[in-house]
Amino acid sequence: MDAVYLMALALASGFPADFWPVVAGALLGSVLVSYATERYRGATGEDMYRAVPALRFLPGKRDERVFLCMVLVILGLVRELFWTLTVLTHVRVFLTLVFGARRETA
């Protein structure tokens, strides 16, 4: 759902070709946020949010991304939305990997 919405928003906004890598980063990051935690569950058999409670406090979960999309689109800040999603989701995925790796080595 997120990827379809973001792709439709990007197409409707008519971004120039040089901005599409940012769009791709936002799309990829949105998918990777969920994939990283589900991959942990598949590999270890335990819920990552229970194993690493600090993840609950990291921004970038789906409900927060949807709220961010709503607010920034209403304000007409679509380009800024894609930049924010790209950075936010990739930082969250990186920290998820760090916390997951730290949990596994501890």
Image (cartoon, rainbow, N blue to C red):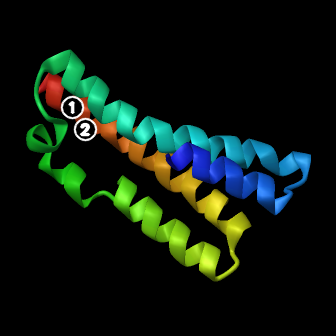
The residue singled out by tag 2 in the image is 99
User: What is the distance, in whole Å, between disc 1 and disc 2 at their CAs?
Assistant: 5 Å
Q: Are marks 1 and 2 in contact (CB under 8 Å)?
A: yes
Q: Residues within 10 Å of mark 1 (few under 14, many from 20)?
A: few
Q: Residues within 10 Å of mark 2 (few under 14, many from 20)?
A: some
In depth, the one of 34 and 90 nearer the eye is 34
Q: Amino acid at mark 2?
A: Phe
> Under tag 1, what secondary structure?
helix
Residue 102 is marked as 1
> Under tag 2, what secondary structure?
helix
Q: Is residue 28 above or below residue 5?
A: above
State the residue lying farthest toward the top.
43
In the picture, measured across the screen, residue 87 lies left or right of residue 94, that is right
Quarter the C terminus occupies: top left
Q: Which residue appears at 16% of the width and 44% of the height?
A: 49
Spot occupied by residue 28 in the image (x, y as percentages of width and height): 57, 37
In the picture, measured across the screen, residue 46 lies left or right of residue 22, that is left
Residue 74: quadrant of the picture? bottom right
In depth, the one of 37 and 101 nearer the eye is 37
Q: Which residue appears at 75% of the width and 42% of the height?
A: 21
Q: Which residue appears at 40% of the width and 48% of the height?
A: 92
